[in-house]
Amino acid sequence: MYTTMVKSRLLDQRVWQLNRQGRAALVASSQGHEALQVASVYALRKGEDLFYTYYRDLAVMVALGVTPREIILGYMAKSGEPMSGSRQFPTQGAIPDLGLVNLSNVVATQLPQAVGAALACVQQQSDAVVAVYFGDGASSTGDCHEAMNFASVHKLPVLFICENNGYAISVPLEKQMAVKNVSVRAVSYNMPGFTIDGTNVSEVFKVVSAAAKRARKGEGPTLIEGIVERYLPHTGDDDDKRYRSEDELAKAKEKDPVQILKQRLKREDILTDAIDLEIHDLVKASIDDATEYGESAPYPDPEGFYDHVYS
Amino acid sequence: MQEINLIEAVRQAMYEEMDRDQSVFILGEDIGVRGGVFLATDGFLEVFGAKRVIDTPISESAIAGVALGAAMRGMRPIAEIEFADFIWPVFNQILGEAARLRYGTEGKLQAPLVLRAPYGGGIRGGLYHSQSPEAYFAHTPGLKVVAPATPFDAKGLLKTAIRDDDPVIFLEHKKTYRLVKGNIPEEEYTVPIGKADVKLQGTDITLITYGLMLHHCVEAARSLKKGNVDVEVIDLRTLRPIDQDTVIGSVMKTGKALIVHEDTLALGIGAEISAILAENVFDSLDAPIRRLAGPEVPAMPFSPTLESQFMITTSDIIEALKELSEY
């Protein structure tokens, strides 16, 4: 889990760097969200359960096994990118074999779709569950309400995983909602709701595992709100200095999920500095390789522009 | 052969497809115990059970989004929007998402869903139970839009729509539900999407239409035949993709075209047909292309005198045809 988080963090840092250098047109960073994303994937069954993500879910993809090469192809909008063939923004599209769908930039549209996928799982008598990821901003939409209500009425196997970083681009939580936590809304859908520390992998793993168990038994959906920090602006085109103080950001960095896990593993004598260095070197080498690979890959052939409009 | 009305044709198509294919299911408001407000799903709950006949909350966006999610997983949902006037919340999930699913995943996922909606006016439905939403959907690549006018076509096209691997918007004119009857064969048949139907052959004017207006157009054409004006009537049946070959071929022969639809004029289906004709058969035209369409008010009013002001009548069509024939 730690290696996966390091991989996601370094990859995220690399693509941000590429963006600053003009080599990647768009980035939306998941730095600060890694523990919630990675531990939730580890609590589920890769290749069987489904993952409906949004644009800040790089670590979910890494945890599912999407490789640095495949990911960087997307950031460079190159040919061979597995989600959408670079028709879409980086990390968007689908890899059906991994149960991974990240279709849209329109906030919260994935929620009703995830509920529909869960309905299909029940109809097809599969015991797969659907994890759907969304930000605190998405929780203000009608689609969020409609999806949660529908899922709960029909007791569908959905895990609503809210990555609450306190900001919808620039709008802080208190201007998005009159309640302190998204999870309190679970009461109105008669489903369990939890607010957890999204930087603590153990807590995430435990709560997601229990929710998945419940969903598989046909007892319905769960709302899990993980409190996380967003370290970087909304995207590479945003300027968070206009709405976030340096003090606040510095404080946020104290809740770095990668550092928290690292310190814990060291305390528990599982990780040594030497092993950590080795992990970083290996990950860095794979990202360097991926960057080179991305640079040398061709752009998509415009010949296929009209493909896949209809069957 | 059996004579049935249009709503019965819709019912039979869904029933037979659900019977044939376990992946077909229906969801919508009041479709279960109530059997649908127009009884399109009468008796389905008892036969197919609550897992395949799903009464939903009043959540149009979720109806569309849930259908889309289920379709991604290989199901073939038929989502019903109770009245087309309530369809606007689905734009996000249908225009923004379903239409782009195949393109945006480079063909890795598809959305074999049907979104059915009763539309159209002339039934005292007022501003919120009369509208024709077809042009909004027909503008969007990735969708197919079907609007049958007869029981035969409704059944055959709905079966094709359910088996189609792309999202299909299936629009049923409310006034045709019980008014329009027709013969359908006992045996299984389908009607292809994307093919217009030449309802009456003629040589002098091409009359292009769909939905309820087809029946007024046929009546008008028959009336002109008595005065020796020979009108060819084309029922488009599918509004995306439009059957350009049939439309172009007919106007090349007749040299004159009248397009009739109940939906409002500007940027409607008639505008697209006009453009297709202007681009392809300009040299064959003997008169300007004419459009007869709903008036430019936001929606159809309730009171009978106001409603009839909105609806196109057979005599309006006759008059327009006469003007064209004399041009």
Image (tube, rainbow, N blue to C red):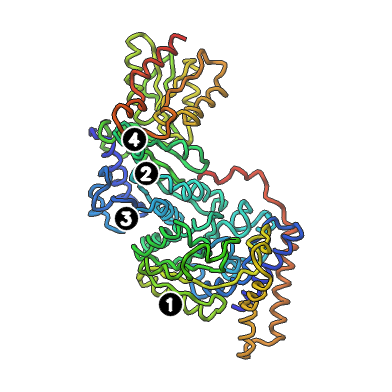
The amino acid on which the numbered mark 3 sits, given as a three-letter code, is Ile
Are the residues under marks 3 and 4 on the same chain? yes
Tags 4 and 2 touching, CB below 8 Å: no
Residue A33 location, x and y as percent?
59, 71
At which x and y percent is residue B99?
A: 50, 46
Residue at the spot of label 4: B173
Cα–Cα gap, marks 3 and 4: 23 Å
Element type at marker 2?
Answer: strand
Residue at mark 4: chain:
B
Residue in the image at 47% along x and 65% along y: A178
Do dots 4 and 1 share one subunit?
A: no
Q: Residues within 10 Å of mark 1 (few under 14, many from 20)?
A: some
Residue on which the image places disc 3: B54
User: Which residue is nearer to you in this view: A146 or B207?
Assistant: A146
Circle 4: element type? strand
Q: Which residue is mark 1?
A: A210
Looking at this view, is B31 or A134 the one in front? A134
Q: Label 1 sits on what residue type?
A: Ala
In 3D space, how far apart are the residues under numbered discs 2 and 1 (Cα atoms)? 39 Å
Count neighbours of disc 2 (C-alpha within 10 A) and say few if under 14, some if 14 to 19, many if 20 or more.
many
Q: How many marks?
A: 4
Tell me which residue sits at (43%, 43%) in the image: B168
Is residue A296 visible from the viewing direction of this image? yes
**What residue type is disc 2 on?**
Arg
Q: State the image quarter where residue A303 is shown.
A: top right
